[in-house]
Image (tube, coloured by chain):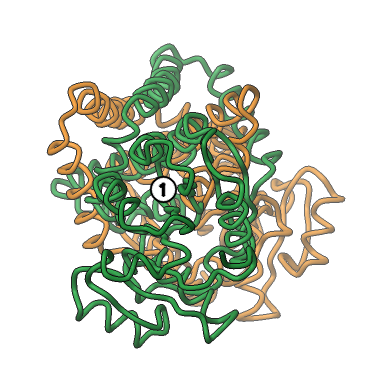
Chain colours: A orange, B green
Amino acid sequence: MSDIHDFGTVAIVGVGLLGGSIGKALLKSNPTHRIIGVGRSVERLNVARELGAVSEISTDLSEIAGNCDVIILCTPVGQIIRDLPSVLSVAGPNCTVTDVGSIKSAICSAAADDPRFVGGHPMAGSEQTGVVAARPDLFGSATWALTPGESTDPFHFQKVKILAQQLGAETIILTPERHDEAVALTSHLPHAMATSLMRLAYQASKRAPEVQTLTAGSFADATRVAASSPELWTDIFEFNREALIGVLTAYRAEIDGFLDDLANAERESIKERFASGSDAKRSWSKQA
Amino acid sequence: MSDIHDFGTVAIVGVGLLGGSIGKALLKSNPTHRIIGVGRSVERLNVARELGAVSEISTDLSEIAGNCDVIILCTPVGQIIRDLPSVLSVAGPNCTVTDVGSIKSAICSAAADDPRFVGGHPMAGSEQTGVVAARPDLFGSATWALTPGESTDPFHFQKVKILAQQLGAETIILTPERHDEAVALTSHLPHAMATSLMRLAYQASKRAPEVQTLTAGSFADATRVAASSPELWTDIFEFNREALIGVLTAYRAEIDGFLDDLANAERESIKERFASGSDAKRSWSKQA
C-alpha cells in the first residue's frame, strides 16, 4: 500500500478544465508523478499531454486501473454516474476513487457504499471549458467539498483530503444531501439566472438593437456563466432536480415580491429589499 | 458664447463616483479647467478637491450658476428630478445642463422641454460609491446614452456629445422611453436578481452555515451589484416602474419555465434553455 502522502500512479478520467488543472498541479509539484489521462479521443489526450496536464494517456481504463493508486473522475456528472460501478469493479482493492462532480447525492448513490470511494467537488470552475483553459493554480483558495459516506475507509478519505489541500484548496466535509442543497442555491441557481437573463436580452435585442450596447458591468457579470457548457449543466439540473425546484421556488417568490412592491408602489419595501441585500453582501464571509 | 470644444466653467453637482470621475478626467485633460464641485457638505467637497476631482467648491449652486458654461447633475435620480426646475431657473441663457441619471423619462419630463437640457446616462458604474472610487478612465469604452428632446438646442446637444466622447465614451442617441426600457432589462433587472439571490443566500446561511463557504465565481458575480447603494436603486426602481414591471414579468416567466421543466423532468427543454442562452452569450456584441 502506498504511503498516504505519495499519490502514486494517478488516473484522471476526462482531462478537461478540472482534470487538466489537477494534472498540471500534480506534475508541477512532482514532475516524476505518473499521471495517466484517460479518455476516448487519442487526439484530445495527446493535446493534454503536450500541454503538460498528464504524463501518459490511455483510452481504456480497465487496462490500467489495476496499477493505479488514485482514480479521479472528471467527466460530466451524468457520465460519472453511469461509469462509477464499472470503474470500481476494475480498480484495485487499495485504489482510492474520487470525483469532481457538481452534485453528490446521485454520484455517491452510484458508488453503492464502496469503502474506496470519496465524493468530491472543487468549487472552482469557469465558463471556459477544455484542457486549454486548465491551470495548476485553479484551486488556490477554492473550497473543495468532500462527502464521505459511513462506509468510506478513513485511509481513502484522508488521501483525497490531502490531495485537495495540496492543490491549494480548503476542504469542507458534509453529507451529499447538504452539499446538493447548498450548491443548488449558490451555484446552480446562478446558472439558471444568467441563462434566463441572456435569453431575454437576446429576444429583446431583435426588436430593440440598442439593448446590445446599453450594457455595463452589471449585465456582463449577471450573464457571464450563461456561456457554460449546455451538456454539463443539463446533467447537473437533472441530477439535482429536487433541490433546484426548492431554490427556484424560493427565488421566484423574491422576484414576485419585487413585482408586488412595484405594482403597489411600495417604496419602503423596495428600499428594505435593497438594504437587506446590500448588508448581506457586505458582511458575506467569502468574497471573490 | 463659449466655443463648442471649450467646456469653460463646469459645475458638477454631486461629486461621487460618476461626478468625481468626470471632474478628474476633465482636469487631467486640462489642469486649468474651472471645475466647481457643488454639494451640501463642505467637508466632503474638500475631500473631492484634495483628490483632484474638482478645482473649486460651492454649497450654493444659485450663487455660481450664472458663471457656469456647463452644469452636470450627478446626484441620485430622485434628487435630479426634484432639483432640475430650480437648476434651470438659475442657469444662464447659454448654459448647457445635463445629467448622468440611470433613468431618463422622468428626468427629461422634469426639464419641461428646456432647450438647454440634454439627458445623459454613462453606462459606467460600480457597486463602489463615493469620490474615493472615482477615476478618470471610468468611461473608457463605456456607452454614454444621450436622450435629447425635440426642443433641445443642437448647440447644447453637440456640447454634451463631445464632452462624453472626450471622456472616452461611445455615445448612443435614443428617446428617453427606449432608453428606460433597455436599461430596465440590461441594468435594473440584474440589480433585482443580485439582491434577490443575496437575500436568499443570507437567509439560507442561518440554518446551513456551509452556504457561506460553498460558493465560487458564479455566486460572486451573480451577487456583486447587491452591494450597491439602496437609496440610489430605490429611486431608480421608483422612477422606472412601468418598464421594470414588464421585464420582471418576462423574467419570472423564464424562471417559471425552468421550474416547469424540472417538475416535468423535461431534459430536452432544459438543454434547449442552456443551449440558447450559451449561443446568445457567445455571440453577444458587447463583451465585458
Q: Residue furthest right?
A: A43
In this figure, what is the number of numbered marks?
Answer: 1
Locate residue A186, reporting x and y percent. Answer: 35, 46
Of A224 and A26, nearer the camera is A224
Of A117 and B117, nearer the camera is B117
Locate residue A173, reporting x and y percent. Answer: 30, 57
User: Label 1 is placed on what type of residue?
Assistant: Ala
Disc 1 is placed on an element classified as helix
Quarter of the image that includes the C terminus of chain A: bottom left
B63 left or right of A24 in image:
left
Of B70 and A178, nearer the camera is B70
Tell me which residue sits at (27%, 75%) in the image: B58
Locate residue B213, reporting x and y percent. Answer: 31, 58
How busy is the neighbourhood of tag 1: few (under 14 within 10 Å), some, or many (20 plus)? many
Q: Which residue is mark 1?
A: B222
B192 left or right of B187 in image:
left
**Is residue A98 at least partly visible in the picture?**
no
Q: Residue furthest top?
A: B264
Could you tell me which chain the residue with mark 1 belongs to? B
Above or below, B73 against A213 in this view is below
Tell me which residue sits at (19%, 69%) in the image: B40
Tell me which residue sits at (42%, 53%) in the image: B99
Above or below, B229 against B69 in this view is above
Of A74 and B56, nearer the camera is B56
Locate residue A57, reporting x and y percent. Answer: 78, 58
**Is residue A34 at least partly visible in the picture?**
yes
B147 left or right of B281 in image:
left
